[in-house]
Image (tube, rainbow, N blue to C red):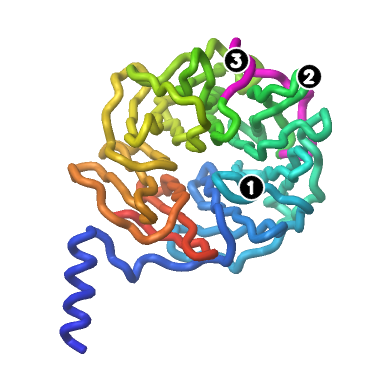
Amino acid sequence: MHSVLLLWFVIGWLIGTDPVDAKQIGIGIHPAVATDPVRGAHVVYGKGNAIFYTTSPDGNRFSTPVQIDSLVGLHLGASRGPQIAATAKSVVITAIDKLGNVWAYSLNRATGQWQPKVRVTDVPDVAKEGFVALSAGTGNVYNAIWLDLRKDNHNKIVGARSADGGRTWSANQVLYQSPDGTVCECCQPSVVSQGKHVSIMFRNSLGGSRDMYLMQSKDGGLTFGKAEKLGEGTWTIKACPMDGGGLFVAKDGTITTVWRRENKLFKARQGQTETEVGEGKNAKIVSTKKGDYVVFQQAGQVMAVVPGEAQPKMIASGGYPKVALLSDARILCLWEQNGAVWAQIIK
């Protein structure tokens, strides 16, 4: 018995984590996580058509998951799934059905009541790829973006804005359309907000290459500037990589990105050159005063690169990791493994 315990300790020391810290928080797949202004953590995930929500004050204790709805034909799997964002007043979840409609669910935090879903897309059946992203900004404002086929049956980046905690949404706006006709069809876009600074990252399809691009707004998502390519290299590929990378915005508005090019991952802060992270896919990132934390998937394992350590370390078996910065600067990681959602603080 003592030898088994010793072996367990050695394994934990070698990978740099305490296995006891990992906890199963729900049955389902594809978790998404967000923090509110006081950095409480909010998590959404799916199982079949069901959408589940749980919350945590500290990344260690999680509430019993609550089923928010059963959305017929919920897009779930291969980076598709419900998304979440939160303000001091509300929590909003977006999800897409397989007909191609984006829906929003909103929680009034004062009453603790979830409101019936409302449709975000103002044209029916146009978000058939199933990719949506969501962010929360100043006050009770939310920005949603998705891949959209309207008018010409080519995927483009379309967005909408809510100023009332997700109860109503603006007229949809085409934010970007590739000159070559379509953006990358199978890669999840990202959106983050800090104050009125809203940033969008997506994988383009331009000139035979599928590279990451960044667009920014300084007025809360009302208007966006020109799409700018990320990184020095390019990825010439005729197929969809199915990998949308990760995007983070700090309190001072600094943007940090991580993305995949061929089999390698790269990260870059705004205005800086790219840095190679290693081999992997499905990466996400948060930035702190200590440096960048990157989580990603590699050969069926969830890996992490943390400040002060040159080599990635294994967190657990599984895939599609997500990461969030908590109020005390600790890093919360979530992932899916064998049909369950797991969480752990990265040390």
Q: Give x and y (percent) for residue 272.
A: 30, 19
Evaluate if marks 2 and 1 touch, with contact meaning CB atoms under 8 Å apart: no
* Magenta span main SS: loop
Q: In the drawing, what numbered circle is on residue 151? A: 2
Q: Which amino acid does label 1 sit on?
A: Pro
Residue at image mark 3: 178
Residue at image mark 1: 82
Q: Earlier in the sequence, mark 2 or mark 1?
A: 1
Q: Which residue is drawn at 51% across and 51% down?
A: 40
Q: Residue at x 69, y 45 (%)?
A: 95
SS at mark 2? loop
Name the foreground residue: 172 vs 91: 172
Q: What stretch is highlighted in magenta?
A: 166-183
Between the C-alphas of marks 1 and 3, the distance is 26 Å
Position above or below: 22 against 234: below
Q: Give x and y (percent) for residue 214.
A: 49, 21
Evaluate if marks 1 and 3 touch, with contact meaning CB atoms under 8 Å apart: no
